[in-house]
Amino acid sequence: LITGAGSGLGRLFALEFARRRALLVLWDINTQSNEETAGMVRHIYRDLEAADAAALQAGNGEEEILPHCNLQVFTYTCDVGKRENVYLTAERVRKEVGEVSVLVNNAGVVSGHHLLECPDELIERTMMVNCHAHFWTTKAFLPTMLEINHGHIVTVASSLGLFSTAGVEDYCASKFGVVGFHESLSHELKAAEKDGIKTTLVCPYLVDTGMFRGCRIRKEIEPFLPPLKPDYCVKQAMQAILTDQPMICTPRLMYIVTFMKSILPFEAVVCMYRFLGADKCMYPFIAQRKQATNNNEAKNGI
């Protein structure tokens, strides 16, 4: 089950799991985009079935071909920021599809406002979708995993859940919160000796999905630390999931930055940020969002 499957990394995760013949359950708040992802998944399934049929006909099918019923995708419109919506949709999934063995908590939002300019409703929305939703989905599907001691919970967080920057206080707080949730959950599973349930924390650097369009670091540094290609980010995350890796930071430089932030005095971290141009990297993004909002209001005659 993948949340936020209608676009961005969620869609790419769906396609990667489809290539590995997973039965997929896709959640998204946008019904149309979620169905578009499902269409792409079905196209992959048809290609796999055609390849299997061709191999079988050629006499090269040494392995048993998976039956058609295993290659299915189910879509559900769900607002993961609303607890009751999550629980009701989860119950539908259990009745209509079955139990979930791999849960990918991927859905995320960003407000794009400075703290004092951000409406309280947007701050609450960011916390609900980026952090609280992980509690609701995990509470919905973890009990069965515990019963059979089998499953995998994937938390798609961010490098901004390991170190912060200016201008995105709500986003950073939500990602720090979900990293803490994931780590505590992982410890709880270990303490309960449920070694059959794996967890993977995904903390990518800025990904070029358009979510933070306009974000810029120092131009001299940018060639050495460009935004990640979404395909690369998801492939690295998939490799971590398939090998039961507890955590994956991309690029690897993020491990070093996190370590330095942990041992250096705060003022030294500020100097490092200023050198990289990371101290105000979100300001162009926020300015673009503000301009877009103003343009929309002008169009609507507000």
Image: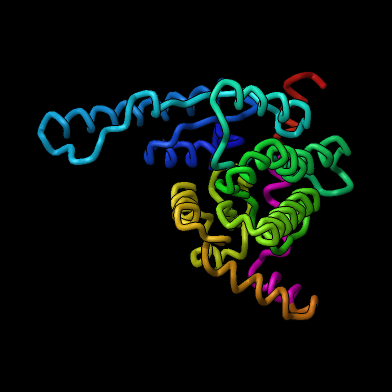
Quadrant hosting residue 293: top right
The answer to whether residue 161 is visible is: no
The answer to whether residue 294 is visible is: yes
Q: Is residue 271 magenta?
A: yes
Q: Is residue 279 magenta?
A: yes
Q: Nearer the viewer, residue 101 or 45?
A: 101
Identity of the residue drawn at 35% across and 31% down = 44
Lateral position of residue 194 relative to residue 264, left or right: left
Residue most extreme to the left:
58
Total labels drawn: 0
The magenta-colored residue range is 269-289
**Place of residue 193 in the rendered image (x, y in percent of width and height, measured from the top left):** 64, 59
Q: Nearer the viewer, residue 57 or 32?
A: 57
Lateral position of residue 157 relative to residue 249, left or right: right
Identity of the residue drawn at 39% across and 24% down = 69
Lateral position of residue 157 relative to residue 36, left or right: right
Could you tell me which quadrant the N terminus lies in? top right
**Place of residue 64 in the rendered image (x, y in percent of width and height, measured from the top left):** 25, 36
**Place of residue 203 in the rendered image (x, y in percent of width and height, measured from the top left):** 60, 57
Could you tell me which quadrant the C terminus lies in? top right
**In the image, residue 227 above or below residue 36:** below
